Image (spheres, rainbow, N blue to C red):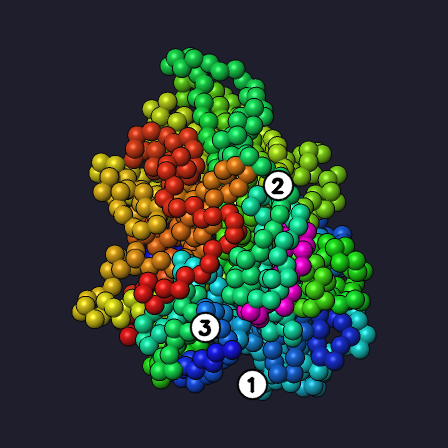
Amino acid sequence: MNHQIFEQSRAPIELGRRRLLGYLVAAPTLAVAVRLGVDTVAPESAAAVVPTPDGPAEIYDLNDMLTSAAMPTAGLITLTMKTDGTAHFALPRSENGQGIVTSTAMIIAEELDLPVDKVVVTLADARPELLFNQLTGGSNTTISTYIPIRTAAAIARGRLLEAAALQLENVPVTALRTLKGMVLAPDESLLSYASLAKAAAVTKSTQVEAQLKDAADFKVVGKPYSRTDARDAVTGKKKFAMDLKVKGAKPTMICRPPTLNGKVKAVRNRGAVLKMPGVTHVVTISTGVAVRAKTFGQCIDAIRKLEVDWLGGTAEGVSDADVLAELKAAEIPLAVPSLPNVPGTVQSVDSEFTFWFASNSALETNCAIADVRSDRAEIWGGLKSPITAQQKIAEKIGLPVDKVKVHVTLGGGSFGRKLFFDAALEAAEASKAMGKPVKLMWHRADDSRQGRVHPMSTARSRATIVGNEVLAYEQRHTSVFTDFSHGLGEIITATAADLPVGDIGFSQTVYSLSQGLHYNFGATTQLLNEIDSRFNTSSMRNIYSPNAAIARELSVDKIAATMGKDPYQFRREFVRTDRSRAVLDAVAKAGSWGRAMGNYQAQGIGIHNEYHGFSAALVEIDCRPTTVNRDIREAVTGPRVTKVVFAVDVGLVINPRGLEAQIMGGIMDGIALTLTSSMHLRDGYFLEASWDNYAYTRQWNVPFEVQIILVPSASEDPGGAGEFGVASAASAVATAYARAVGKQPTEFPINHGEPLHYKVKPQVPPIPQSPRNGLRAN
Amino acid sequence: MPKHTFKVNGRRVTVKVDDDVRLLWVLRDLLGITGPKYGCGINVCKACTSHLNGKAFNPCSVPVGKIGPDDEITTIEGLADTVGKDLHPMQEAWLENDVAQCGYCQPGQIMAAVDLVKKAEKKGRAITDGDLDSIRNICRCGTYPRLRDAIRDGAKGM
């Protein structure tokens, strides 16, 4: 992979009238507490062409909602300095690979003037008093925690200087400075933070005002830093939920129904299964039959032996073609009438697209440990909404919320999946029913087939153009219901009165606040309609945006073609902001836009704005028959993206190396969503049961060249990064593919209608047996 | 209950368990060696990739009864010891390229990469794009470009 990092602009942070307050807290060693919550509203002004007024997402976007929801109610987060010279902070968020533990350590290190490896960032247990403020989603972590965490660190540094001045006697605080965990006196003598940790403690909690460092003096923030857990990850020391040792917590798996959400009617051979080797418990819970055994292998054997009668599911007999028909019938009509395609007159440019179900299954399957006793419970899991999880678990097992302790463990990927806590709920239910601690893990086949999916949707667009002007642009998104019941719903309820979109429901709110306006296309409307809640759904990395962006950017190519304009030049002319134009120019230049390509090969370009940031992708694709038809066993090969150039302006970059990693992952997601990966619904059941069925990007689909350009930003506030790579990459793959084959595709991924590349695994028993030929197969 | 004795990461171990239990569960659930991860249990995702007598294999698909007393199993935890260092060159390359994101698949990726490089070396050639394309280990975080860079770098140190 090529790296290209421009020197970041270093405008001093304009904190204006914000007063940054924190508290020195009474504790044995120095402790500083601050509230979470920061105001970051930055409307952009419109450019030339037929101007499009700011939409809701420009004035107040999803991130503003997430951050301001926290403001009035947020509890305190605390930074403590220990006598060994390390600073400790429990981050009220969930780490699933996005790099927030590392970036948080960097932010603290910067403001506290301490080496990054002396900052210990852990994940906080569920803290109900934080109310809405422990949700990890919407790429919001850094946006909402950047200023509060800096405030805490700045107060801590100030207090260490004061303590040093007291010890040194006759030396004013102003004569002291800090350097990498030390206080330096004018006579060059040094006092370590370790030696000051106790002296800097206070006996009575007091409010103090913070003085933040000038961004021009940043030494850590903005410089590439490798993940703080990288060594643990490569040596096998990193512990995920299923690697934890909890006394008595034995492997537990669930026998699930052959339809979506079917329920147990009767278990016919419980006694026989209980006698199988290793098996300790077999109990019926609300989602199936839970089996606890000495090893997971014995759980698998037992599940395959279970004879269960099932009650019907929620989507019996339904296939994805039926869902498509429903969605089509539910589409909100376009407002401007369709006009004939006569050059020189007012014309319509229409497009229609289908996006099939997709999976956000992570490599770590749904899992959790639960130890439920009669009067208390303890839960461990990679949970992105631990407070909601705690409430729902307490409700499920009939305990008061304060008797349920929820620990947030390091997660093995989320992609939206860990916003929900399906396995934690099941683990609690099973542990209660069995009277024993359980280590509950989903089988891959279940995680894929019965786990939550990204809802299927359609998009329609109509541009109304005359000559070289776009008078109006409408886009309609019609989707299977997206489940936001993991806590985001409460945030929306809490902030509803303040939202510029009015009371339009949860999903519509998220859609309106995440779909910014990208082009000056005159009167622009973007509407969402959701129907059908029979499926288990959740947000998937970047929520609606990849689908919306594919539809929009393909439509843009079509409008440009109708006007006889080059796709890049057309976008340059019509984008609404200079920041958008800058990322477009960056990819066009670095990717040599317009270079000659052979038959069935093409470049494509796409943009996306979100999370207070701007991005553009330039993709080269190879659709030659020799490439498309290359044969790899049980794999989707097809067109190969050979090169991606991606430019991003996310505002202030905390960790360029981490940002590049997130964008790189987003690009891989974008390739999969466009070319290879979907779930097939047949007769009420999803077919894909393994990673060789659900064709997420694999090594044989990876571009040979990926170049990520971090464009200097005009903004000094950090934006969101975790999901930002997906939408513009997906749309650029789509436009490249369309140009290579000379025809715009109308469904995504493009291979959904092709014959399955695998043999469908049986539904009963619900999970496959592990092979025994592993010594031969390699 | 049958007894099974073999070597894991240089240490001789004995476990009492039925022959048919797959080695992955013996390692994880009985011996507490958690570097090899569960990702599918059907030899597809390769998250459990480890080495048997120096060659890559997937313990999710090998019954423990097929492992003999002379067999040596190396998991990610024991990889560095095979070269007598704190870190194997492939692990160094992983750190150098900051490959891991969530890290769940990475032990398997590293063990597969070491094997891939050894195979290429035996054929007397450097790692090609074709070799990299043949890796079946899945990474849902999409670290693939950095994986490819790290394998090429790691090969230089091996």
Q: Secondary structure at mark 3?
A: loop
Res. B84 in view: yes
Let me know if residue A432 is in the magenta part. Answer: no
Residue kind at label 2, given as amino acid type: Gly
Disc number lying in front (3 or 2): 3
Chain of the residue on which disc 2 is drawn: A
Figure check: A344 above or below A166:
above
Q: Amino acid at mark 3?
A: Asp
Can you tell which mark lies on residue A322?
A: none
- Report which residue position mark 1 lands on: A188
Residue range in magenta is A277-296
In the rendered view, would you say A46 is above or below A372? above
Chain to which the residue tagged by mark 1 belongs: A
Q: Quadrant of the C terminus of chain A?
A: bottom left
Question: Crowding near pointer 2: few (<14 within 10 Å), some, many (20+)?
Answer: some
Q: Amino acid at mark 1?
A: Glu
Q: Nearer the viewer, residue A9 or A599?
A: A599
Q: Secondary structure at mark 2?
A: loop
Magenta span: chief secondary structure: strand
Residue A342 horizontal/vertical position (percent): 39, 12
User: Tags 3 and 2 in contact by the CB under 8 Å rule?
Assistant: no
In this rendered view, identify the residue nearer to me: A173 or B40.
B40
Which-is-in-front pick, marks 1 and 2? 2
Q: Which residue is tagged 2?
A: A313
Marking on residue B19: 3
Residue A163 lies, with reference to residue B60, above or below; the image says below
Q: Is residue A10 visible?
A: no
Q: Earlier in the sequence, mark 1 or mark 2?
A: 1
